[in-house]
């Protein structure tokens, strides 16, 4: 059993996608295959990118802590809301600041939107950036349209089973990739 990081990337006041991040963390915990560990960019509040971590003379301890957590994890699920057809600046910040941390890391994507399309457009730009940083994005996604209606303010939902079924399409592929990665490292 390893640790899967849930990277919640909205730092917006009144954000809603964090409800989805909490849902995913709970489902992963109850699957019992790996343990989920929430890393919330709203908690970290990193300054705007100036240079990659490996070139910083005096990096923030929180940046080092997230770096260590990503390195120690077996996989990451990124939860990203769609902003103007792309993903939040706070997420780009951490994608750019880390380098080796992302290399061949199995990554599952969750896209969230307030409208019909469940963040379909952000997936394209996010997949491309993750490809550029050398991550291993699994070929599935969990998309949540109408986030405000799907998850109430307290995080509850009336469609737990439907959402779990759709999330499983992503976690099955992520778990497979994590196992494949582990076997390669053993070989
Ligand atoms: C700056 C901004 C841009 C947005 N652009 C889009 C968009 O391009 N497509 C879309 O479906 N929703 C868009 N939305 C709606 C968001 O997806 C929706 O508000 C969602 O709840 C945002 O996640 P958050 O609440 O966790 O920040 C936008 C919202 C904001 C704040």
Image: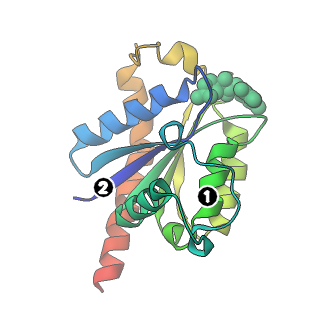
- Residue 70 place in picture, x, y as percent: 42, 60
Outermost residue, right side: 84
- 78 left or right of 81? left
- Residue 66 place in picture, x, y as percent: 44, 56
* 47 vs 25: above or below: below
User: Which residue: 36% across, 61% down?
Assistant: 73
Question: What kind of element bears circle 2?
Answer: strand
User: What is the quadrant of the C terminus in the image?
Assistant: bottom left
Image disc number at residue 3: 2
- Residue 158 place in picture, x, y as percent: 40, 13
In this figure, which colouring scheme has been used for the structure? rainbow
How packed mark 1 is, by other alpha carbons closer than 10 Å (few <14, some 14-19, many 20 or more), is some
User: Which residue: 30% across, 55% down?
Assistant: 3
How packed mark 2 is, by other alpha carbons closer than 10 Å (few <14, some 14-19, many 20 or more), is some
* 115 vs 132: above or below: above
Outermost residue, front side: 58
Q: Is residue 176 visible?
A: yes
Front-lying residue, 21 or 38: 38
């Amino acid at each position: 059993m390893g640790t899967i990081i849930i990277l919640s990337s909205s730092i917006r006041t009144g954000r809603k996608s964090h409800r989805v991040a909490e849902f995913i963390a709970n489902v992963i915990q109850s699957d019992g295959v790996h343990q989920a560990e929430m890393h919330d960019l709203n908690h970290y509040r990193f300054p705007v990118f100036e240079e990659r971590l490996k070139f910083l003379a005096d990096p923030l301890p929180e940046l080092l802590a997230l770096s260590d957590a990503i390195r120690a994890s077996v996989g990451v699920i990124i939860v990203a809301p769609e902003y103007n057809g792309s993903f939040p600046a706070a997420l780009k910040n951490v994608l750019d600041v880390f380098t080796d941390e992302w290399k061949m890391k199995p990554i599952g994507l969750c896209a969230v939107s307030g409208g019909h399309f469940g963040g379909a457009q952000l997936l394209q730009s996010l997949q491309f950036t993750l490809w550029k940083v050398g991550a291993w994005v699994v070929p599935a996604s969990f998309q949540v349209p109408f986030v405000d209606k799907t998850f109430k303010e307290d995080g509850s939902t009336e469609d737990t089973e439907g959402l779990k079924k759709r999330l499983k399409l992503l976690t099955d592929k992520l778990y497979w990739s994590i196992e494949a990665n582990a076997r390669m490292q053993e070989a």
